[in-house]
Amino acid sequence: MILSSGFKMIGVDTNSKMKAIFILNFTKLIEWPEKYREGNFVVGVVGESPLYNELVKMSSTKKVANQSLMVKQFNSPDDITKCHILYLSKDESDALNAVITKVKSNSTLIITEKQGLVDKGAGINFIVKDNRQKFELNKGNVEKYKLKVSSNLEALAETVK
Amino acid sequence: MTKRLYILLFVSFLTSAVFGQFVGRDHLSVSLFYMQKEELDSAQKYIDLAANEEEFKGSAKMWYYRGFIYKDIYKVKEKDDKQSPARLEAIEAFRIMLPLDAEKSEFTESAGKILKYLASTMYNDAVRSLNPEHYKLAISNFDQYKSTMLMVEPGMDVKTQDVKFKLALASMLNRPAETEAGMDSAQTYQVKKLYLEILELDPDNPGANYNLATLYYNEAADIINHMDYDMDIQKLNEVQDYCIEIFLKGLPYMKKAYELNYKRKETLIGLSNIYYGLNDIEKSEQYKKELEELEKE
């Protein structure tokens, strides 16, 4: 009789897929200034992160309103160019201050994923609560870059500051 | 004229010689006569008649020979039929016979041997039917095998074979998952159910623990993989809740497989993946490191 062999696991980056969906939602629930609503919608990723590949995958099928989605990877804050959204992975959290300095004159939503960074300049910080991917929102940190936060986003955030 | 009379007398003699031997003989005896002559059709005809007669309904002898004749019919005519009606008829006859023979024990030993033989053919047919087209037949033959064996040896432990059979069945049913077509939810449910049954019989079965955990993981991972990027956050939260529940269901089985030292590398990948799905990156990394260490060895 054939004995059972070990089954193969599906290869999928579950965590990055969730984050990518959140990010596409943020583009719909936050309003960028007029001059940011033309050309490509750029999402930058600082440092190495599995999210980069997922965002690239998403960009091949999705748009932000009528803007094409473009994903860029920056090795360091010095390399950062104009972005609508900038994501700092947990490993790059120490670079937050340098990132803020770099984007201060732009309308950039800064997204991080380390506890406490929402109090240190990030607009949105990914957190994990009860094994679920959630996010914290610092409305002030978002709006100081001339971005408008919809009330829906506030309602969906785990905490709003 | 005289010649014709002789012929008539001769034919009449022959007829009475053939049929005369049955005069006053019951259907059981007639059936046994044909059975000895290996004329199975006639033996079957008369044993069927006997089985419907009041005088034989409580006769262990009649039921024994009915089982015997139907066993021969199976062997001669239906050996290749995995659903052989004669085999079932034989088993049923012995089932009725056994309690009737309990006191005298005249036929029990012989019936037991025949039943074991019939059970073994059921088992072989079950194994041969383990394919996507005939697996339901495999299940029914295997169930019949078990009940037949338990008829002969009521205290027999069929657990080991039960586990082996279910493992092979689950493995076969999971084959579509290894292809591009994948499995639909009904198929996944069926395979999961089988593993749960196996683990009820044998909670420490390493392969079943690992495969069940993998099924749970794959179910949740597949849902996440197919989520539309446009999904709104409210819906996303609902899907997350559902998937977390599934990852959590799989976790204890993967932990158990790990404890049982089953396919060390695969279980480490499994644990790392499940914790990653649970967004417990620290634990996921911990198992990933253990895997890296193992690979260095």
Image (cartoon, rainbow, N blue to C red):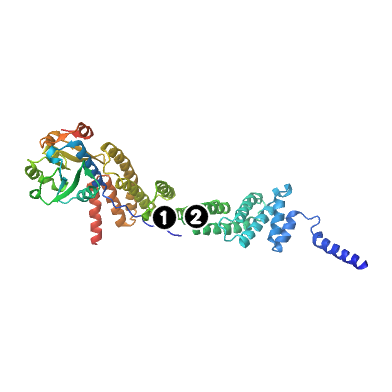
Which element is circle 2 on? loop
Going from N to C along the chain, the mark reached first, 2 or 1, is 2
Residue A125, horizontal then vertical, whole percent: 17, 40
Circle 1 residues within 10 Å: few <14, some 14–19, many ≥20: many
**Subunit of label 2:** B
Name the one closer to the observer, B189 or A143: A143
Nearest to the observer: residue B276 or residue B233: B233
**Residue B116: percent from left, percent from top:** 57, 58
The residue lying at 21 percent from left, 38 percent from top is A28
- Left or right side of B9 for B136: left
Front residue of this view, candidates B179 and A148: A148
Type of amino acid under label 2: His
| Left or right for B264, reference A125 | right
Q: Residue B226 location in percent, x, y?
A: 31, 46
Q: In this view, does B120 lie to the left or right of A38?
A: right
Q: Is residue B106 at all visible to an observer of this figure? A: no
Amino acid at the residue labelled 1: Ser
- Which label number is shown at residue B290? none
Spatial separation of the CA atoms under disc 2 and disc 1? 15 Å
Q: Is B239 above or below relative to B125?
A: above
- Residue located beneath label 1 in the image: B171
Residue hosting label 2: B134
| Mark 2 crowdedness (10 Å alpha carbons): few <14, some 14-19, many ≥20 | few
